[in-house]
Amino acid sequence: MSDATMDEAAKQQVKDALVRHLKGELDASQTAVSTEQRTAQVDPDDSHSVDDTAQLDEAGDKNAIFEQVADTERSDVATAESLDFSVTDVVRPGAIVGFGGDRYVVGVVTDAFDANGLSYEGISQDSPVYAEIDGKRAGDTFTINDRQARIDFLA
């Protein structure tokens, strides 16, 4: 893969790495949910102080938060798996776009992950950046945060 082009197979490798990364995040969240569920359980035969009960309530609250995070991450995995990663000449969900020296997968939010020796991040369709780059082509410019940028790479 050259720095300026990317074929269908290389894009599929990026998609596979993205899905693996998102599933890893989901697995970590599910482990946290399981841990919080175990700590929030009470043995009805034991006696409990007010402090013990308050800590159990707090653990239950954390469990609900971890569950919400896990639900969001399940949705992110499903979104990533359903993205059309075919090669494209316009920015759209499933495109890989480069600007400012970085590369991004369009259509799902994620922190940095590596594929094919390069680092990528995700851009959601509801982000301000996506609103500026949607439908643009390699070489087009756009403005974000009062700074002009150029799309250097698009696949």
Image (cartoon, rainbow, N blue to C red):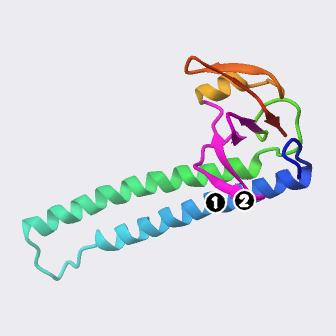
User: For this rendering, which residue is in front, 41 or 124?
Assistant: 124
Task: Report x, y in % for residue 48.
Answer: 11, 74
**Left or right of residue 85, residue 123 in this image:** left
Q: How many marks?
A: 2
**Left or right of residue 96, residue 130 in this image:** left
**Left or right of residue 120, residue 7 in this image:** right
Which residue is depicted at the point 91% across and 50% down? 8
Marks 1/2: CA–CA distance: 6 Å
Looking at numbered disc 2 in the image, what kind of residue is underneath it? Ala
User: What is the quadrant of residue 132 in the picture?
Assistant: top right
Q: Secondary structure at mark 1?
A: helix
User: For this rendering, which residue is in front, 30 or 108?
Assistant: 108
Instruction: Name the residue that disc number 1 marks.
Output: 21
Going by the picture, which residue comes out furthest to the bottom? 45
19 to 147, vertically: above or below: below
Which residue is depicted at the point 24% across and 74% down? 42
Q: Which mark is residue 17?
A: 2
Residue 22 forms part of the magenta stretch: no
16 to 135, vertically: above or below: below
User: For this rendering, which residue is in front, 99 or 40?
Assistant: 99
Task: Report x, y in % for residue 28.
Answer: 50, 65
Task: Report x, y in % for residue 73.
Answer: 56, 53
Q: Residues within 10 Å of mark 1 (few under 14, many from 20)?
A: some
Q: Say if mark 1 contacts mark 2, CB within 8 Å.
A: yes
151 to 66, vertically: above or below: above
Residue stretch rendered in magenta on the structure: 97-126
Q: Which mark is residue 104?
A: none
Q: Secondary structure at mark 2?
A: helix
